[in-house]
Amino acid sequence: MSKTVIIYKTKYNSTKKYAGWLAIRIDADLYELSDIRSSDLKNYDTIIFGGAIENGYIRGIEFIKDNIEKIKDKKVIVFYVGLGFYSLNEIISLNFLPTYKYKSIKFFELMGDFDYKKLSLIDKVRVMYGSGKIASNLVNYKSNIQNTKKDNLNDILEFLN
Ligand SMILES: Cc1cc2nc3c(=O)[nH]c(=O)nc-3n(C[C@H](O)[C@H](O)[C@H](O)COP(=O)(O)O)c2cc1C
């Protein structure tokens, strides 16, 4: 039987919600990144990694990159959770160079939540003084944005079927 694992790295829980919903829906094993080792990956045919976007970078994505040789013949999906500031091309050039190494990965963007008031002090500072698009966009987001909903997983579910 084909086996799937979902590995996630979150800070404010949107990514965890998506990973959990998906795991129940497709009956996959679910791990927070720090609870899984590279050697566990051999037990799976499909690897799904979910990470929150921060200043253009996908949290925890090194795990997939460091293991890319090991998983190159498996189905690999990366979903990244943010507020839609970056195109896929930008995400790829910020996170996946050289691109040929990561050609087999299928990417999905999922919209996450953002509540300025609940950010840690350091994240408030990062948002205020962040780089590139963050400086111009996120600074204006002072309200509580709630984007996380199960229906956003439909594209991934369709791809998996
Ligand atoms: C410091 C910081 C930097 C962020 N940078 C980005 C970004 O570059 N692009 C984006 O779309 N969203 C950005 N966001 C928004 C988060 O990706 C969004 O809130 C997401 O839901 C967080 O996922 P999590 O709840 O799993 O931690 C940033 C948020 C914080 C706090």
Image: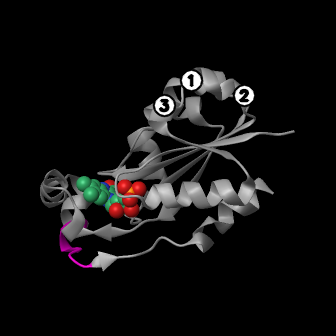
Residue for point 41% across, 52% down: 52
- Mark closer to the chain start, 1 or 2: 1
Classify mark 1 as within 8 Å of ligand 1 or not, answering yes or no. no
Name the quadrant where ligand 1 sits.
Answer: bottom left
Q: How far apart are marks 3 and 2 (CA)?
A: 16 Å
Q: Position of residue 141 (x, y in %)?
A: 24, 74
Q: Does the magenta stretch include residue 46?
A: no
Classify 45 as above or below 158: above
Mark 3 lies on residue:
63
Determine which of the numbered discs, if any, sits on residue 43 in the image: 2
The range drawn in magenta is 138-143
Amino acid marked by disc 2: Asn
Rendering quarter of residue 121: bottom left
**Callout 1 secondary element:** helix
Evaluate whether residue 98 shows in this view: no
Q: Earlier in the sequence, mark 3 or mark 2?
A: 2
Q: Report helix, strand or loop for mark 3.
A: helix
The residue lying at 41 percent from left, 65 percent from top is: 84
Circle 3: residue type: Phe
User: CA gap, disc 1 to disc 2?
Assistant: 10 Å
Rendered view: 51 above or below 70: below
Q: Is mark 2 on a helix, strand or loop?
A: helix
**Quarter that holds the N terminus:** top right
* Residue 48 image offset from top left, x and y in percent: 62, 44
Q: Callout 1: few (<14), some (14-19), or many (20+) C-alpha neighbours within 10 Å?
A: few
Residue at image mark 1: 38
Q: Nearer the viewer, mark 3 or mark 2?
A: 2
Mark 1 near mark 3, Cβ–Cβ under 8 Å? yes
Q: Can residue 158 be seen in this view?
A: yes
